[in-house]
Image (cartoon, helix red, strand yellow):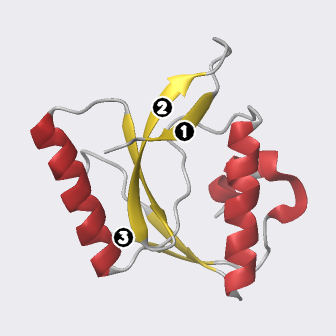
Amino acid sequence: MLNIVKALEPLGNVVPVNLKLIRLGKSSTEFLRPIKVFFESKDIGMNLFAAYNTATRSGKSFPEGFRISRDRTALQRKLLRSCYDDLDRSGETKLRIVFVNGLRTVFSTFLKNGDGRHRQQPNPS
C-alpha cells in the first residue's frame, strides 16, 4: 500500500487514507497484476480519478507503467473490445474511442502547435 500512496504523491492531499486493495487475475512472473482499489464512497473515487486526469494533462509525472482507470461493467468491456476490434480490422490508427452519454464516439488525436499536447476532434465516421 505504501507504494501506491507514493505513486499518488503528485496528486497532493487528494489521496484517501482508508483504502481496501485486492490484486486482480492470476499470479504470474511475466507481468504485474492490476490492483483494484475500493474507497469509502463513490465520490472519493471520482475525485481521485479527476485529480489524476488533471495532473497527467498538466504534465506531472507518475511512475512508469502507472495508470488509473475506473471500473467498467462487463457490457462496457465487451463494447469497448468490439470497437477496438473494428478499428484494427479497418486498419485505422491514431484513434481513440470515448463513450459520451452512453454512445461510442471515435476521436482522432493530433498534436496541437507541436507542443506535445493531444487534443481530440470528433471523427466524422
Q: Marks 3 and 2: which is nearer the front?
A: 2
3D distance between C-alphas at marks 1 and 2: 5 Å
Residue at 69 percent of width and 72 percent of height: 46
x 16%, y 49%: residue? 86
The C terminus: image quadrant: top left
Q: Is residue 15 above or below residue 53?
A: below
Find numbered disc 3 in the image and state the secondary structure of the residue it sits on: loop
- From what the image shows, is residue 113 above or below residue 37? above
Looking at the image, do the residues carrying marks 1 and 2 touch, with CB atoms under 8 Å apart? yes
Image position of 112 (left or right of 92) = right
Question: Percent position (x, y) of residue 114?
Answer: 63, 11
Q: Nearer the N terminus, badge 1 or badge 3?
A: 3
Whole-number angstrom distance, CA of label 1 to CA of label 3: 31 Å
Instruction: Residue at the far bottom: name it.
Output: 40
Residue at the (79%, 72%) spot, across then down:
16
Q: Which mark is residue 109?
A: 2
Outermost residue to the top? 114
State the residue position of label 3.
24
Amino acid found under the numbered disc labelled 1: Gln
Q: Which residue is mark 1?
A: 120
Image quarter of residue 68 = bottom right
Q: Residues within 10 Å of mark 1 (few under 14, many from 20)?
A: some
Quarter that holds the N terminus: bottom right
Question: Real-space Cα distance between discs 3 and 2?
Answer: 31 Å
Q: Residue at x 19, y 60 (%)?
A: 82
Single out the residue that lies furthest toward the left.
89
> Residue 96 at what x, y percent from top left?
40, 43
Going from N to C along the chain, the mark reached first, 3 or 2, is 3
Left or right side of 49 for 17? right
Asked whether 91 or 32 is in front, the reply is 91
Q: Earlier in the sequence, mark 1 or mark 2?
A: 2
- 104 or 8: nearer the viewer: 104
